[in-house]
């Protein structure tokens, strides 16, 4: 893996961790209460406690919210929260709620990973910074798909990143059926209440619980869909919204669009644009700055490599005496994920340059699809009550809101044709993104409380909308149409690369702080990044890099 400095490592981790879903751990139980927020109507008081060793700066709590907001007496769902108290409490404005994206990104662990370094000191001084795991995610009654985390990891290791040939498509579809069916069997009742609209309703209760009259919110990527949903449901309860890396809500829900989500979001086009910049800047950096440039034209070198990997995967050492296999699907996924963080572009170039075709290692057999059974929701709930399955951070957290929020226009048998069409639009990335949501075709669960529009907003307060020019996951082309949904949107463009302002920009951080603290933002502002692609990293890179194991959903926001 990359060996980088602490700050860069934290930012790199948060850029892709919601997609890889590797953040694990639980808060320390039984800690002495640190603070108690005053009780608010509809929600018990939040009891803030220690989060455990090495997390002394944080406080943790749980909230019980109605599983069905239309029927609060029908039961509750646990929501896990953490907060960093304001550093200047005598000047405190309120709480700043964060959503790091996903769907399925665990807010608690990611805030613990990042600490207060993500935000400008003036924001840290004036706000309690609060992150939470949305319902069905992480520590918040997670939607799990296997008996325990180890069983899920073992299953995920058998999956390709995406299918390429027709025979692979059939096996991939069977595996997606296994995953979707397993999630439905074990967590159908949790998925059925996991819509983003219900997350927004939870967020409104949490806002009340911390004593804020109106919401102050910073949402990244998928978090901009949550922000748009909250504002549509509660337009009079908004103080300030920072919406960074925009997801067009109409594209997300997809009503009336005959394309699958991974195609209609346009990520394949945005990824190709970012990848084009990777190749251009690599050539400019030359052999001294970019290993691919030492082998010839970077684009031709990578295309040749991808063609060889499509015929025969490469096997290479990973530094501990063992080997790993990298096929075409892995390489395309590695390139796509690396576009999230220009800090990693030099390492990506070194990895691609070092690969050579070798005999392939056979892949483990793919499990075959099973049947969901007569009453899948009852099965999962019963097994939990009997202690036969565990709660753990799971791929199901990513699928939960995704599957009940978004429209699947084709069913499982329609994905190959959609992937072929997307591949004709954009080589490599089109096929990869088109397959991303296939497991949802095997999750026949509906959340009746999901919100699907209209999306024209009526919020009176100005909102700050941010787009990064070469963002592979949330296309910059969506920034202006997203801003047009709001009566008063102030657009900030980050001239740079990667996914959202997780890629450091002192200028953007100051603009966000000025808006959050003073409610002032200039429309049409432009910021640069602090990162220069292919610049040396703070620490020496390990030349061997393990292939990332992707979840079948892949990063969406």
Image: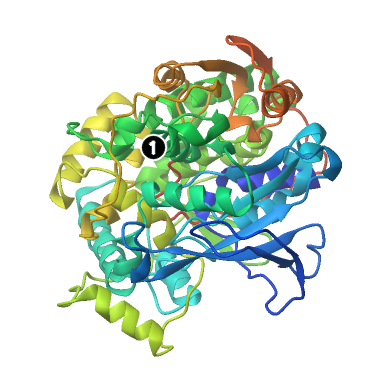
Q: Is residue 473 visible?
A: no
Residue at the image point whose x is 55% and y is 16% from the top: 491
Image x and y of residue 171, in percent = 24, 60
Around disc 1, counting alpha carbons within 10 Å, would you say few (fewer than 14), some (14 to 19), or many (20 or more)?
few
Q: Decide which of 78, 247 is in the foreground and name it.
A: 78
Image x and y of residue 248, in percent = 38, 29
Horizontal side, residue 428 vs residue 330: left or right: left
Image x and y of residue 19, in percent = 49, 50
Q: Is residue 180 above or below residue 301?
A: below
Q: How many marks?
A: 1
Disc 1, SS? helix
Q: Pointer 1: what residue?
A: 307
Which residue is most to the bottom? 386
Q: Decide which of 177, 399 is in the foreground and name it.
A: 399
Horizontal side, residue 477 vs residue 351: left or right: left
Q: Is residue 186 visible?
A: yes
Image x and y of residue 431, in percent = 31, 38
Q: Is residue 157 above or below residue 411?
A: below
Q: Is residue 384 above or below residue 556?
A: below
Residue at the image point whose x is 27% and y is 80% from the top: 379
Q: Image quadrant of residue 44?
A: bottom right
Residue at the image point whose x is 31% and y is 57% from the top: 70
Q: How is the image coloured?
A: rainbow
Horizontal side, residue 142 vs residue 7: left or right: left
């Amino acid at each position: 893996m990359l060996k980088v400095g602490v700050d860069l490592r934290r930012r790199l981790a948060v850029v892709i961790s919601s997609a890889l879903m590797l953040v694990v751990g639980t808060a320390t139980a039984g800690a002495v209460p640190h603070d108690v927020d005053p009780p608010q109507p509809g929600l018990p008081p939040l009891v803030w406690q220690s989060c455990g060793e090495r997390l002394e700066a944080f406080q943790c709590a749980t909230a019980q919210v109605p599983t069905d907001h239309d029927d609060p007496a029908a039961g509750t769902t646990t929501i896990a929260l953490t907060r960093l108290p304001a550093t200047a409490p005598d000047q405190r404005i309120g709480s700043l709620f964060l959503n790091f994206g996903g769907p399925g990104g665990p807010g608690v662990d990611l805030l613990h990973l990042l600490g207060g370094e993500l935000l400008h000191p003036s924001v840290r001084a004036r706000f309690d910074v609060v992150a939470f795991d949305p319902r069905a995610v992480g520590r918040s009654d997670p939607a799990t798909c296997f008996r325990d985390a180890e069983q899920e990891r073992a299953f995920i290791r058998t999956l390709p990143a995406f299918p390429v040939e027709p025979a692979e498509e059939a096996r991939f579809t069977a595996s997606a059926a296994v995953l979707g069916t397993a999630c439905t069997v074990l967590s159908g009742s949790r998925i059925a209440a996991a819509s983003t609209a219900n997350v927004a309703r939870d967020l409104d209760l949490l806002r009340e619980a911390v004593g804020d009259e109106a919401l102050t919110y910073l949402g990244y990527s998928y978090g901009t869909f949550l922000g748009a949903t909250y504002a549509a449901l509660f337009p009079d309860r908004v103080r300030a919204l920072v919406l960074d890396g925009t997801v067009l809500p109409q594209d997300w829900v997809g009503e009336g669009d005959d394309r699958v989500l991974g195609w209609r979001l346009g990520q394949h086009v945005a990824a190709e644009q970012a990848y084009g910049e990777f190749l251009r800047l690599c050539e400019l950096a030359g052999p001294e700055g970019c290993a691919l440039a030492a082998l010839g034209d970077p684009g031709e070198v990578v295309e040749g490599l991808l063609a060889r990997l499509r015929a025969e995967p490469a096997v290479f050492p990973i530094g501990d005496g063992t080997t790993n296999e990298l096929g075409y699907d892995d390489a395309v996924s590695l390139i796509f994920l690396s576009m999230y963080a220009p800090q990693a572009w030099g390492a990506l170039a070194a990895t691609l340059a070092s690969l050579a075709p070798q005999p392939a290692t056979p892949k483990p057999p793919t499990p075959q699809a099973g049947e969901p059974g007569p009453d899948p929701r009852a099965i999962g709930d019963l097994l939990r009550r009997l202690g036969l399955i565990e709660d753990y951070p799971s791929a199901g957290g990513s699928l939960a809101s995704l599957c009940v929020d978004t429209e699947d226009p084709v069913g499982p048998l329609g994905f190959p044709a959609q992937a072929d069409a997307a591949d004709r639009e954009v080589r490599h990335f089109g096929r990869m993104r088109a397959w991303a949501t296939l497991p949802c075709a095997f999750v026949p669960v509906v959340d009746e409380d999901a919100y699907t529009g209209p999306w024209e907003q009526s919020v009176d307060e100005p909102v700050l909308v941010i787009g990064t020019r070469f963002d592979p996951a949330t296309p910059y082309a969506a920034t202006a149409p997203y801003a047009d949904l709001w009566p008063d949107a102030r657009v900030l463009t980050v001239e740079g690369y990667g996914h959202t302002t997780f890629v450091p920009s002192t200028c953007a951080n100051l603009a966000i702080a000025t808006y959050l603290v003073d409610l002032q933002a200039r429309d049409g502002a432009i910021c640069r990044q602090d990162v220069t692609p292919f610049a040396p990293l703070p620490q020496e890179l390990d030349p061997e890099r393990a292939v990332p194991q992707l979840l079948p959903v892949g990063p969406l926001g």
